[in-house]
Amino acid sequence: MKLARTYYDSCTDEEAQSELGTLPLMALISQLGGWELLTNARFNSANYHWEALAGQLTTIGVDGIIKVFVHNSFQDRDTHILMFSPPKLFLEKKKFYRGAPSTNAFLAFYREYIRELFRLLGADVDDDASEIEYQVNDIIDLERRIANVS
């Protein structure tokens, strides 16, 4: 119970959150291998393996491309089976990904959200505008593909 209280207090301590700013998130991104668009990133595509990143994300409770979990067998409750399912989409419902990205209002708002996130995390939105646009489109395209196959 003491640990739960500590976590709760850290989530509600707005003064400490303001002081830390994006530091905890930037430290996590760095620990996971960095992101080349962000200031002081140390991303190295030669050493990047998505499988390793998926494993690291799982250890902190974040689903990767595929959600993997253990479930009771449907035939025998005493047996456990490994289950695979698609990840949770950011916009949650498949219908929000339908239609052309240029005319889909949900994707337009999501696009702005991602751009603002890049800006808040220190990406140079003016100097790296074309690279940011490429990454935003790539993120949305990946999620649309996942939505279409799930």
Image: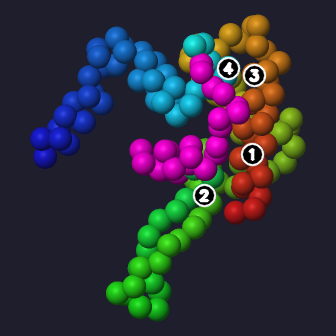
Give the extent of the magenta segment: 41-63
In the drawing, what numbered circle is on residue 132?
Answer: 3
- Compare marks 4 and 3 and give the one earlier in the sequence: 4
Residue 103, quarter of the rendered image? top right
Left or right: where 105 falls relative to 58: right
Left or right: where 7 falls relative to 90: left
Question: Marks 2 and 4: CB-CB under 8 Å?
Answer: no
Judging by the rendered image, the residue that carries numbered circle 2 is 66
Amino acid type, label 4 = Leu
- Residue visible at 75% across and 8% down? 126
Q: Secondary structure at mark 3?
A: helix
Give the CA distance from mark 1 to mark 4.
18 Å
Q: Nearer the viewer, mark 1 or mark 2?
A: 2
Q: Nearer the viewer, mark 1 or mark 4?
A: 4
Alpha-carbon neighbours of circle 3 within 10 Å: few (<14), some, or many (≥20)? many
- Compare marks 1 and 2 and give the one earlier in the sequence: 2
Amino acid type, label 2 = Ile
- Compare marks 1 and 4 and give the one earlier in the sequence: 4
Q: Secondary structure at mark 4?
A: loop
Q: Nearer the viewer, residue 120 or 35?
A: 35
Judging by the rendered image, the residue that carries numbered circle 4 is 37
- Residue visible at 19% across and 34% down? 6
Total number of numbered labels? 4
Q: Is residue 105 visible?
A: no
Give the CA distance from mark 3 to mark 2.
25 Å
**Residue 128, horizontal then vertical, whole percent:** 76, 13
Alpha-carbon neighbours of circle 4 within 10 Å: few (<14), some, or many (≥20)? some
- Residue visible at 45% across and 24% down? 27
Judging by the rendered image, the residue that carries numbered circle 1 is 142
Q: Nearer the viewer, mark 4 or mark 3?
A: 4
**Residue 146, horizontal then vertical, whole percent:** 72, 54
Question: Marks 4 and 3: CB-CB under 8 Å?
Answer: yes
